[in-house]
Amino acid sequence: MEMNELQTLRHSASHVLAQAVKRLFPETKLAIGPAIDTGFYYDFDSEHTFTPEDLEKLEAEMKKIAKENLKIERFELPRTEALELMKDEPYKVELINDLPEDATISFYKQGDFTDLCAGPHVKYTSKVKAFKLLSATGAYWRGSEKNKMLQRIYGTAFLTKDELNAYIEQREEAKKRDHNKLGRELELFTTADIIGQGLPILLPKGARIIQLLQRFVEDEEQKRGWQLTKTPLMAKSDLYKLSGHWDHYKDGMFVMGDEEKDKEVFALRPMTCPFQYQAFLNRGRSYRDLPMRLNETSTLFRNEASGEMHGLIRVRQFTISEGHLMCTPEQLEGEFKSCLELAIYMLKTLGLYEDVSYRFSQWDQNDREKYIGTPEQWNGAQGMMEKILKHLEIPYKIGIGEAAFYGPKLDIQIKNVYGKEDTLITIQIDQMLAEKFGMEYVDKDGVKKNPYIIHRTSLGCYERTLALLIEKYAGAFPMWLAPVQVKLLPIADRHLDYVNEIKKKLEDAGIIRIEVDDRSEKIGYKIREAQLEKVPYMLVVGDKDIENNVVSVRSRKDGDIGSETIEKFISDALYEINNKIIK
């Protein structure tokens, strides 16, 4: 099965959906309907709000269209005739008007339905057999919040029913692991309309996991020669104008003030680089100061479009394990390799390494306004990164137009449970901003030179990482990360004194995230509750345990393990925690 064959089928399914919508809701205006990695979607402008019940009706109508076995025929028209044909479809008219003068304007017709489309498509609607409509959501026309909000219906289609059923089963499993649902159920985070979209509140358990991750990252970075800084959350517009963010990123920033009215305009920082450069510029530097590795646990702010935000994965305020490294040309490859080794160590420790892929993000030379620097500088930086990646034998895909405005980058990509891909970690080479900021060092030959800068994250965004960990482990975190590591379950009130002795022994040994369930409930109920909360270990205490000076151990994974001395349990638990073991 060739992927293009599947994409063709899915594109055809989007047209069958559009035809079904026009039959049941004839006043609807059509936008676009492409195939995507997980299926297809079509955007509609309709006064009617599509409900789950509507999706069922539309799916039934699609099956009817498939049974009609309509021939799907391609034809072309001159621009004037094309505009006349689509005169009642404003979005299609806009698309036609945006086409180059010499463009071929093609359409596909199936029965009473015709759509502007480049194709290709299957030959008959009967080929669209194994499909399912999944959801309806909002989407801005052409992805811009300046445009009208349309309704997007997502669906999927496969060549066989078996493949469709397997996908639906996988999707049901994904729903169980969806961090947006599970994270709230486990009381890791919440949101509040009165605070705003994309501004999650980490509850005590979620905040604890983030704290553990931050401590782990900062300690590991210190071991590897990184020096911690703490810089302001905002700055005057002058700083961002110097760095280039004002010209290339202003729409994504939260700006305070009006340049025409106010003496000073401030903005919350979308990244930390221009702030950390001030640490380098604090005094004169020589080659002996390099490499200078500066890391920071940075809180950043980005004005994401409302349609782009999702749970903890894409938010407006987030915290990142950011770092900037100034080095000589001779040090560049070794330092880049060290940054990558740190990222891989983090991913392996968290159990995410097998889930990632690599993207070499390059500039788009046809979109020069998006970037600073000359073609020679870009070709030099990208050539250098390509050489480094080949030496390190990193298997990557190329992403044209995905580079930062100041340089190419290696993006470590990861997918959520629904297959949506996001960047988790980036490592970037920059030979332009040091010159802009006047960052210089005196080399061995006594000549002042600009250092190379590596921008990097070691774990990326903590909120996004937490979301991915929730989904990876379905909320059952490894013991070293679990917000509650041990739950003590006395069978009756008379066992509480012994339970408190056990609790103190655990705390004295360093196992401190403990809860005692002293409710007057049956022990079976307490065990089930602890299991639902995904607690790694439960220590049950009854008369026999006190008599034998032991505890009855239950594992989240293995169930009843049996009786152990508390010393044996502590020894095994500390080994699991200290070695960050994933069970």
Image: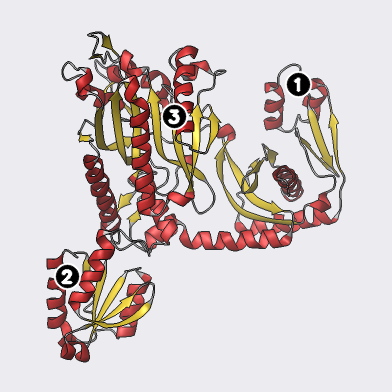
User: Which amino acid, by three-letter code, is at mark 3?
Assistant: Ile
Q: Which residue is mark 1?
A: 103
Give coordinates of residue 86: x percent, y percent. Answer: 77, 30
- Point out the image quarter for the C terminus: bottom left
Disc nearer the start of the sequence (2/3) = 3
Q: Residue at x 48, y 50 (%)?
A: 355
Look at the picture and state if 465 lies above or below 34. Answer: below
Q: Which residue is mark 2?
A: 506
Q: Residues within 10 Å of mark 3 (few under 14, many from 20)?
A: some
Q: Observer-nearest residue: 395 or 1? A: 395
Give coordinates of residue 242: x percent, y percent. Answer: 32, 16
- Marks 1, 2: nearer the viewer: 2
Q: Observer-nearest residue: 528 or 86? A: 528
Q: Which residue is mark 3?
A: 388
Disc nearer the start of the sequence (1/2) = 1
User: Which amino acid, by three-letter code, is at mark 2?
Assistant: Leu
Q: Residues within 10 Å of mark 2 (few under 14, many from 20)?
A: many
The image's colour scheme reads secondary structure
